[in-house]
Image (spheres, helix red, strand yellow):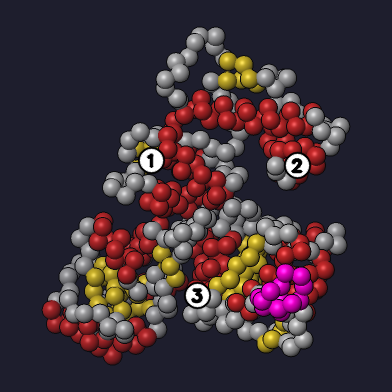
């Protein structure tokens, strides 16, 4: 194969009808297209990591295009697709464009100019971060629509607000907005507004000059300065203190910042992407969030749905997590029953919970197949066979027969973990004057405690109000 150059477009070539002839291959190379051979699954994975383009020949419908999009996204990639169709099949070409192909060529067109023009139109591939703890897969039709919408928004300079439940992948969608934009060559700087003490957030965002306060031994460039020419992502923006919201609004309006202890304003060239799992309208009504800031950050709103509402993403995410966390020397798969359980589960913890379930299953499984007994879900299951909870919160064995201790059954382990959680929460509530105090003892937020209590009540378990 000809050596790749800076202007080469490595491409996966899929044609179920004919192979590429030597003359045609030479013309494609002159246009800048370098074909990557694929004969094994390993070749496919390697090709997906290198390819800037996938070229598909459609035969009567867009089925192959749909399969390729699902496959590439299951491996964590979003790669531009060019489709080849018969010259008279105009409707098929239009349908291919509607379903995500960036360009269509006649399957008889091998001219160098046509392919050069097609390659010049190719958008930059957006590879989702492999080390992300909440990888977003765009396979379900709802997710594919969200991806296309995000790409359109990325081409503008407007601020974007991503809303959705915890663990659904808002941070990864923010990265997609950056990678698909003209700022992709600049930095992507992220901060979780709920993860830092209030007194540190201002310094982290806007920086300080040397000597601005005791201990300021040198100047510090804040995150806005660090994001110059790129994107700043503020996660959980609803948790930002109210007085800092005022300063953030002024920075967004003036496109300038002044470091703490400084006088000279610094011009900014930064795009803001924010995210929240809260209803900001309700926060505004409760005077917890500034209405003018809301309108400033939400020029375009993108909604990430809970995982249960995009079921087509579940199995691709499972495959991706198995690949990321499984052994490198062999492939781990789910049994049909385990797959059925994954698809029927409600996933209250969204993608983050799915990741946890897969990591636990890899620990519990003994072979290359993960079975239903290896799955431990975060949500409390009311119907457990190994243990039961009496009204006083005591764990009682269903049977008095002695159980062997040499073998740990994953179902029993799951039930034991959940029973312990119930006991711990009930004990904390009984010994506390209110739920805030109980949550503090448990090391969780009051909101998490309310969620757990609601789960217990839904399953008919007795709950006690904190005094």
- Farthest residue, direction top: 401
- Farthest residue, direction bottom: 113
Tell which tag, 1 or 2, sits nearer the viewer.
2
Distance CA(mark 1)–CA(mark 2): 39 Å
Q: Earlier in the sequence, mark 1 or mark 2?
A: 1
Residue wearing tag 3: 180
Distance CA(mark 2)–CA(mark 3): 42 Å
Tell me the element at label 2.
helix
Q: Residue at x 53, y 20 (%)?
A: 386
Residue wearing tag 2: 440
Q: Earlier in the sequence, mark 3 or mark 1?
A: 3
Are there few (<14), some (14-19), or many (20+) residues within 10 Å of tag 3? Answer: many
Vertical placement of residue 41 versus 203, above or below: above
Residue wearing tag 1: 334
Dot 2 and dot 3 residues touching (CB under 8 Å): no
Of residues 459 and 216, the one drawn nearer to the viewer in this rendering: 216
Q: Is residue 467 left or right of residue 49?
A: right
Which secondary structure dominates the residues rendered in magenta?
Answer: loop
Is residue 9 in sight in this rendering? yes
Report the span colored magenta: 206-220
Of residues 355 and 99, the one drawn nearer to the viewer in this rendering: 355
Q: In this view, does 199 lie to the left or right of 48?
A: right
């Amino acid at each position: 194969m000809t050596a790749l150059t800076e202007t080469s477009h490595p491409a996966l070539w899929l044609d179920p009808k004919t192979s590429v002839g030597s003359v045609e291959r030479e013309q494609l190379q002159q246009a800048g297209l370098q074909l990557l051979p694929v004969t094994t699954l390993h070749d496919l994975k390697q090709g997906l990591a290198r390819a800037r383009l996938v070229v598909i020949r459609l035969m009567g419908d867009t089925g192959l295009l749909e399969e390729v999009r699902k496959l590439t996204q299951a491996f964590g990639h979003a790669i531009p697709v060019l489709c080849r169709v018969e010259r008279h099949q105009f409707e098929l070409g239009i349908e291919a464009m509607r379903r995500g192909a960036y360009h269509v060529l006649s399957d008889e067109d091998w001219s160098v100019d046509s392919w050069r023009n097609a390659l010049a139109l190719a958008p930059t591939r957006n590879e989702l971060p492999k080390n992300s703890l909440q990888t977003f897969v765009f396979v379900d039709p709802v997710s594919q629509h969200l991806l296309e919408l995000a790409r359109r928004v990325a081409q503008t300079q407007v601020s974007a607000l991503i809303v959705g439940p915890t663990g659904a992948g808002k941070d990864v969608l923010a990265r997609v907005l950056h990678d698909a934009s003209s700022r992709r060559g600049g930095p992507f700087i992220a901060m979780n507004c709920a993860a830092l003490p209030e007194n540190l957030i201002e310094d982290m965002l806007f920086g300080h000059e040397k000597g601005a306060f005791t201990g300021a031994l040198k100047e510090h460039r804040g995150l806005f300065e660090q994001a110059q020419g790129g994107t700043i992502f503020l996660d959980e923006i609803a948790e930002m203190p109210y007085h800092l919201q005022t300063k953030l609004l002024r920075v967004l309006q003036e496109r300038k910042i002044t470091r703490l202890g400084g006088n000279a304003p610094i011009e900014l060239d930064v795009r803001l992407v924010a995210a929240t799992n809260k209803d900001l309208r309700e926060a505004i009504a409760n005077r917890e969030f500034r209405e003018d800031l809301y309108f400033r950050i939400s020029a375009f709103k993108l909604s990430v749905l809970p995982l249960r509402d995009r079921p087509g993403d579940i199995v691709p995410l499972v495959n991706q997590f198995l690949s990321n966390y499984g052994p490198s020397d062999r492939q781990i798969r789910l049994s049909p029953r385990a797959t059925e359980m994954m698809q029927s589960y409600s996933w209250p913890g969204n993608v983050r919970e799915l990741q946890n379930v897969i990591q636990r299953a890899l620990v519990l499984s003994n072979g290359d197949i993960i079975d239903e007994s290896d799955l431990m879900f975060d949500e409390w299951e009311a119907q457990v066979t190994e243990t039961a909870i009496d009204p006083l919160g005591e764990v009682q064995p269903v049977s008095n027969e002695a159980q062997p201790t040499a073998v740990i059954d994953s179902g029993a382990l799951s039930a034991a973990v959940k029973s312990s959680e119930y006991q711990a929460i009930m004990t904390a509530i009984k010994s506390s004057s209110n739920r805030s105090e109980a949550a503090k003892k448990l090391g969780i937020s009051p909101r998490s405690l309310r969620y757990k209590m609601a789960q217990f009540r839904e399953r008919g378990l007795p709950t006690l109000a904190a005094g």
